[in-house]
Image: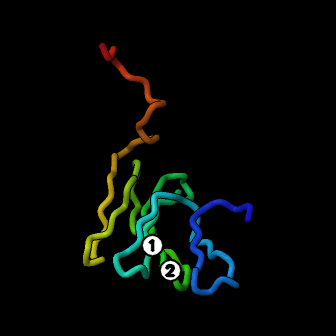
Amino acid sequence: MTDSGIFIKSLTAPATGPKRLGPGGDIAWSPDSQQLAFLSSDKGNLQQLYVANVKSGAAKRLTTLKGDFSNPQWSPDGKKIAFLFVADALRRPGAGVPIPYPLA
């Protein structure tokens, strides 16, 4: 397998290969394990939140926002998904972002 992205592999049907759900990362299983929420870039190279049906592999985009997403999490009843979002962010904050003042 040379492609990258989000894959699922059945442990009860070992003869079947992994199923690719799409490109992306930051995944979260629904409480009933029937859906997978994940982040993936759209055609404009902006991250968006998607949900895929695990059995069919069909994915649906849930957001059309401009900014940075992370950490999708399902509610215990599976009816909502929470995520962290920074509007208009061009990149994720982290070690590569310069610190504007000394740490001393």
Relative to 34, say whether 68 is above or below. above
Q: How is the image coloured?
A: rainbow
| Residue at image mark 2 | 54
Residue type indicated by callout 2: Val
Which residue is at 26% across, 73% downward? 76
Q: The C terminus appears in which quarter of the rendering?
A: top left
Numbered-mark total: 2
Looking at this view, is 24 or 62 the one in front? 24
Q: Which numbered disc covers residue 7?
A: none
Residue 100 % position (x, y): 35, 20
**Cα distance in 3D space between marks 1 and 2:** 7 Å
The secondary element bearing badge 2 is classed as loop
Q: Quadrant of residue 78?
A: bottom left
Residue 21 % position (x, y): 57, 72
Residue type indicated by callout 1: Leu
Q: Quadrant of residue 103?
A: top left
Dot 1, crowdedness within 10 Å: few (<14), some or many (≥20)?
many
Relative to 89, say whether 58 is above or below. below
Looking at this view, is 6 or 48 the one in front? 6
| Residue at image mark 1 | 36
The secondary element bearing badge 1 is classed as strand
Residues at discs 1 and 2 in contact (Cβ within 8 Å): yes
Looking at this view, is 89 or 84 the one in front? 84
Residue 94 % position (x, y): 43, 35
Disc on the earlier residue, 1 or 2: 1
Which residue is at 34% across, 77% downward? 31
On the picture, is 35 further left or further right than 58? left
